[in-house]
Image (cartoon, grey):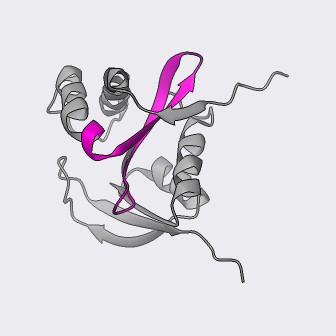
Amino acid sequence: MTLAPAPIIRPARPEDMEACAAIHSDWIDTTEWMPPRTRSTEEMAQSYRDRAFVKRRILVAELGEAVAGYLSLDEPTGEITALFVGKRGQGIGTALMQEAQDRHARLWLGTFQVNDGARRFYARRGFAELERTEGENEEGLPDVRLGWQREVAA
């Protein structure tokens, strides 16, 4: 049995933004409970280049030479603003999250209440529910805020 290669985590480059937007767009398009997207993949990529890339630390996971996932982090606040992977079950999300947890003592994020898979993923990485909202997001879906804090050795 051959183990799948581990993803390589690196800082994103401007030219990665199209691949990141495509991963996000594909997730929206294939998630049954998501409302239709309001922006094209090209518009998303432009927004990533103009806004997210300059304001946040964006990490990408590469498998082979292709971007397979990304994590966007607002470093001053510790907010993970996005975590999307192209294919689940390959350790991509885990590797990205581990990189963020290795760099920060506290992190927080929001996810949709209905997104059970994401909520299980975050719980396995030590995130706990902080609060719920009725949909303070672009999609208008109820969400949940989750937080994580590194344990301090006694």
Residue drawn at x 59%, y 17% as measured from the top left: 64
Q: Which residues are magenta?
A: 53-79
Residue drawn at x 36%, y 65% as measured from the top left: 145
Could you say where residue 88 lies in the image, as x and y percent from the top left?
55, 33
Q: Residue furthest right?
A: 1
Could you say where residue 52 lies in the image, as x and y percent from the top left?
26, 40
Apparent side of residue 114 relative to residue 92 in the rendered image (left or right): left
Could you say where residue 18 lies in the image, as x and y percent from the top left?
31, 21
Q: Residue furthest left?
A: 38
Residue drawn at x 41%, y 32% as measured from the top left: 12
Query: Residue 34 in magenta?
Result: no
Q: Residue furthest bottom?
A: 154
Number of numbered discs overlaid on the protein picture: 0
Query: Residue 69 in magenta?
Result: yes
- Quarter of the image containing the C terminus? bottom right
Q: Quadrant of residue 17?
A: top left
Apparent side of residue 119 relative to residue 43 in the rendered image (left or right): right
Q: Quadrant of residue 152?
A: bottom right
Asked whether residue 85 appears in the rendered view, the answer is no
Nearest the viewer among 36 and 38 is: 38
